[in-house]
Image (spheres, helix red, strand yellow):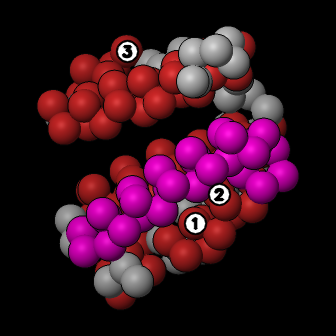
Amino acid sequence: MFRVSIVRLAAPSSIGTQSAGMKQVPMALLPPIPLYRRILRCHRKKLPIEMRLLGDQYVKSEFRAHKQIDNPAHIIGFLTEWQTYAQQIEGDTWQGELMDKTKIDKMSDQQLGQMYELMKSIREQELAENDPEHGK
């Protein structure tokens, strides 16, 4: 699926271990395929069916779109963000959370467009759930 360089970059390491008296460092990145499976499993266990379908579709398209990436910085950023997302879903800390403004400021026009389309889909779904007449 992803190039070999991604697998090497995301291979488990000693990062994430804690030495005596030292601050906890971030957990090692999961390789792409295990991370992808973990996200889909989180969706299956934690999300209502409507959100799960939307989330699964989005995750699949994002992982496909980033399949051929070979820039290490982009690979690490992509895997880090998705791993953080999986941790939030697992811990139920994602609901009602606002997106960090610095992340929004760093997004390209294409990414902002994707976020807007995702927001529209979620709002349309919420309207349909709360107002059955809206969906007709």
Q: Which residue is mark 2?
A: 39
Q: Please state the extent of the stretch shown in magenta in the rendering.
A: 43-69
Q: Which residue is mark 1?
A: 36
Nearer to me, 48 or 8: 48
Q: Residues within 10 Å of mark 3 (few under 14, many from 20)?
A: few
Left or right, 106 with respect to 21, comes to left
Q: Amino acid at mark 2?
A: Ile
| Secondary structure of residue under mark 3 | helix
Q: Say which residue appears at 31% left-offset and 36% top-offset.
A: 114
| Left or right placement of residue 13 versus residue 62 in this view | right
Q: Residue at x 67, y 60 (%)?
A: 40
Magenta stretch prevailing secondary structure? helix
Check the image and report above or below for 95 versus 107: above
The mark nearer the N terminus, 3 or 1, is: 1
Which residue is more in the foreground, 12 or 63? 63
Answer few, some or many: residues within 10 Å of disc 1's Cα (few below 14, many 20 plus, some between 14 and 19).
many
Q: Residues within 10 Å of mark 2 (few under 14, many from 20)?
A: many
Q: Position of residue 29 (x, y in %)?
A: 55, 62
Q: State the residue lying farthest toward the front.
A: 136
Q: Is residue 103 above or below residue 53?
A: above
Q: Is residue 8 visible?
A: no
Tell me which corner region of the image, top left, top right, bottom left or bottom right, holds residue 101.
Answer: top left
Of residues 128 and 121, the one nearer the viewer is 128
Q: Which mark is residue 101?
A: 3
Q: Amino acid at mark 3?
A: Lys
Using the image as rendered, state which of residue 57 and residue 105 is in the foreground.
Answer: 57
Q: Residue at x 32, y 72 (%)?
A: 67
- Quadrant occupied by the N terminus: bottom left
Mark 1 vs mark 2, CA separation in Å: 5 Å
Q: For the residues marked 3 and 1, what is the alpha-carbon distance in whole angstroms?
A: 26 Å
- Which of pointers 3 and 2 lies earlier in the amino acid sequence? 2
Q: Secondary structure at mark 1?
A: helix
